[in-house]
Amino acid sequence: ETGVTQSPTHLIKTRGQQVTLRCSSQSGHNTVSWYQQALGQGPQFIFQYYREEENGRGNFPPRFSGLQFPNYSSELNVNALELDDSALYLCASSLDGGGVTDTQYFGPGTRLTVL
Amino acid sequence: QKEVEQDPGPLSVPEGAIVSLNCTYSNSAFQYFMWYRQYSRKGPELLMYTYSSGNKEDGRFTAQVDKSSKYISLFIRDSQPSDSATYLCAMSPILTGGGNKLTFGTGTQLKVEL
């Protein structure tokens, strides 16, 4: 077990709604990354937070936003949901930001379905 | 063209077979290469990582990197039914600052049959 937990496990929303997904990192891990994994695809990097500041962002629109808290928890917020946002959302925690050898430990994911 | 290409499979092999999983990439900035295993309804877990061209062995698993050809492989010897999963290659550039973003392949679904 990696010690990274995510909630909820599954979520169903309708187009246009807003959603908040939560992640609890391993204790002591200062970095959290969020990925979107569409069915049959590999995870795509959304953004990374290091010590509560955004530390890199992938090709996702601003309606994807995040927060990281001092207690090793974090959130991914998505506004104005679209059908294509249906995916498995993964968070990954790692010890320190920027280190290429910094192993990312993934949680089990939240499966979001947008109707 | 995707930065990382991976044959999605599915790949079905008998128990005990040698499995070869492959990825190609186009971005020369990628210097750090990883293989993740993802079981159904689980998050990816890191199997192996390597920086340099050549082979790296860990038990039944061998990772191979050929930077000149932009080609990486994962070999699984004596495959077991418990190896049945989706295998994802992932890559990252070496960054001097923050944000070690991983770029993943699409994953290859492997089934090892008794």
Image (spheres, coloured by chain):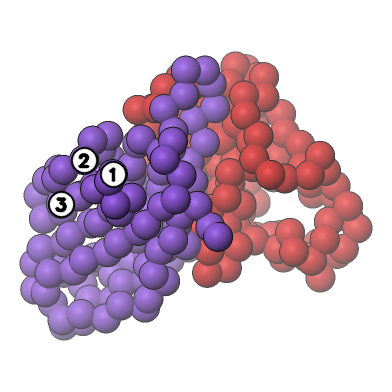
Q: Residue A57: image x %, image y %?
A: 65, 34
Is B59 left, or right, of A99 in this rendering?
Answer: left
In primary-sequence order, the first of circles 2 and 1 is 2
**Image quarter (top left, top right, bottom left or bottom right) of the N terminus of chain B:** bottom right
Residue marked by disc 1: B67
Q: Amino acid type of disc 2?
A: Ser
User: Mark 3 Cα within 10 Å, few/some/many (few <14, many 20+)?
Assistant: some
> For the residues marked 2 and 1, what is the alpha-carbon distance in whole angstroms?
6 Å
Q: CB atoms at circles 1 and 3 under 8 Å apart? A: no
Q: Secondary structure at mark 2?
A: loop
Q: Amino acid type of disc 3?
A: Thr
Is A81 left, or right, of B11 in this rendering?
Answer: right
Q: Secondary structure at mark 1?
A: loop
Residue marked by disc 3: B62
Q: Residue B31: image x %, image y %?
A: 36, 35
Q: Secondary structure at mark 3?
A: strand
Which residue is found at the position 83% from the left and 43% from the top?
Answer: A63
Q: Amino acid type of disc 1?
A: Lys
Q: Residue A69: image x %, image y %?
A: 66, 22
Residue marked by disc 2: B53
The answer to whether residue A106 shows anywhere in this view is no
| A51 and B76: which is toward the camera | B76
Q: Which chain is red?
A: A
Instruction: Kindly indicate whether the residues beneath marks 2 and 1 are on one polypeptide chain.
Output: yes
Tell us which disc is closer to us: 2 or 3: 2
